[in-house]
Image (cartoon, coloured by chain):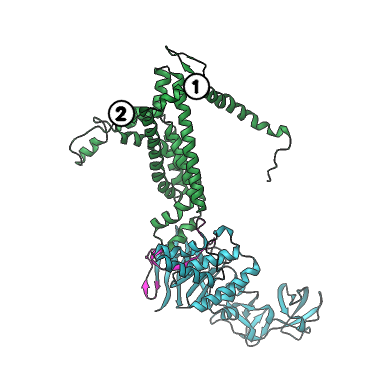
Chain colours: A green, B cyan
Amino acid sequence: MRREPPQKLGDYAPLLFPAAMLTIFFVVPFGTMIAVSFFQRLQGGFYTPAFVFDNYARFLSAFFGGVLGFSLFLAITVAICCVVLALPFTYMLTRMGRKVQVVWLVALLSILSLSEVIIGFAWSTLFSRTAGITNILVALGIMSEAKALTPSFGAVLTGMVYQAFPYTVLVLFPALVRLDPTLTEAARTLGASPLKAFFTVVVPALRNTITATLIMVFIFALGSYLLPQLLGRPQHWTLSVLITDQAIYQSNMPFAAAMAVFLVLVTLGLVALTVIAGRKGEAA
Amino acid sequence: MSGLALQNVVKEFGSFRAVNNVELNVPHGTFVCMLGPSGCGKTTLLRMIAGLDLPTGGAIRLDGEDITHVPTHKRNLGMVFQSLALFPHLTVGENIAYPLRIRGAAKEDQKKRVDELLSMIHLTGYADRPVAKLSGGQRQRVAIARALAISPKLFLLDEPLSALDAKLREAMQVELRQLQQKLGITTIVVTHDQREAMTMADTVVVMNGGEIRQAASPIEIYRRPADSFVADFIGQTNLLEVQADSAGRVEVLGQPIAGLALPAGASKGTLSVRPEDVHLTAPGAGALSGKVTFVRDLGGTIETFVDIAGRQIVAVSTPRARPDVTVGQEVGIALTPDVCVVLKK
């Protein structure tokens, strides 16, 4: 079937509803937030309309800059871990039988149905001294005594990778299914071991998909707010935690809004950089 | 022995036998075409030679060495896939250099070899183009060059020309055969196109139902097919039931024909006669007689359809030897023993 471009104004009607929803529930609140970020804060949790840069200026302190840096570092690390783990896994999965695929995909989808709170508490139990996995290692004689693995950076990372992994697989899956299986077979007949074939053919052929997946997981991880608090120390808290803290506990709406806007800008900037770098790499 | 040997090779998928006890010797430097209808096991056999599938029984030997369980990447072969499987993220030159790069060849050596191969396939100067910008025939050549980059011992092609249009395909067949003769490389091509097999092969292997029905030179396969499947699959033929009469002579449609013999011990058989060997005569003068039902005049050749007691026979002749017949006319048909082959039932 050939798709006709819309002819009459009425043909745009199906777009009206989503456009209205987007405007009411995204564009308007985001606009409000940008406005509030320039407001003047008053004592006692109130603020008045104004146009001051105080909130942004305060953000540019070493402390908040450090938190922003850590948030970005954490999100990038989670994105890289997820793709490095999910790419070989998904590649193997696409080469398995239909039934095996369905079982795995259902299992992954069921992880998505878990709330972040449940994931956080489950991992904090698994990493605890009294009931955690170190007890198994002690029983096996690998470790001499059980110890707590949380709170720590590793625990935060594990929890977040666990949470983002199913998304990563689901985004990579269609691209890997479409990848012509004779490409790797050809690589093997030309002298590449299966491992070499994977790195010289599958990975480069999927460059764009991998970049897109990295960006998706990065943005997903950047918004994480609960897991760093449940599994990490205060120095592992992300900017999202601080924003919540300012907005709800310190009642400093203008400052919270300024941090949120800044986070959005930095994120967009990084994504744009990645896309430009990807284009350049392709042209070269 | 120098060359490729398949010994009693079997491949089973569950309870299905895709390849059944295949025995084949391919001497060094020969060009073999494996021919058969789809699902006859020819591609599976090729994939086992390449190591992409493992046989469930039997052995594959290359130059005397058992390679049945040697992994594909250690077999040092070149293979062209039906889909060509050119790497989309690499240029023409990088595609051809891939097997050299994987083996860690020096950059200058890679470049030298790529230039050599590009001139061999008449694509000099194309090294830096992306493969997506090439035409079908050019991609075909690049896939061939890539497979030949390391001068492999064995050159395998799976339906390599099926994506090309008819004219280009015919030209590529000739080119591929000339290239193979120049390089003297042992080559195995899988095809379902019998013209392709006849054009290129030293040995044609006709397969059906996972078994080799006949392996011989193209002309032998055409002139002396081993059974009615081979006779019917290669070229056009007329197949007629024959049986021995009380005096031991061979009867075709109730008419005894001198000089024919049934296979030893058989009382029935199938007679195969090529349309160009069927000659029309005056009514009553030939061994059989029938009525013309249709004349297809193709300019270069004329096909005459003759109905004999309910069986249809096709005769092909050139316009110079044009039989002056019209539909509905009674004609005689001459069958001489030297052009007839009697096959086992």
Q: What percent of the width, then of the height, locates residue A106? A: 45, 39
The N terminus of chain B sits in image quarter: bottom left
Q: Nearer the viewer, mark 1 or mark 2?
A: 1
Give B314 or B38, whichever is nearer the viewer: B38
The residue at which mark 2 appears reads as: A233
C-beta proximity under 8 Å, tags 1 and 2: no
Give B313 or A262, whichever is nearer the viewer: A262
Give B260 or A30, whichever is nearer the viewer: A30
Camera sees residue B221 = yes
The residue at which mark 1 appears reads as: A38
Amino acid type, mark 1: Phe
Q: Are marks 1 and 2 on the same chain?
A: yes
Q: Earlier in the sequence, mark 1 or mark 2?
A: 1
Chain letter of the residue carrying label 2: A
Height in image: A35 above or below A269? above
Residue for point 56% across, 27% down = A27
Amino acid type, mark 2: Arg
Q: Which residues are magenta?
A: B61-90
Task: Say few, some or many: other residues with alpha carbon within 10 Å of mark 2 (under 14 / 14 to 19 / 20 or more).
Answer: some
Chain letter of the residue carrying label 1: A
Q: What percent of the width, then of the height, locates residue B20? A: 46, 67
Residue furthest to the bottom? B259
Residue furthest to the left? A144
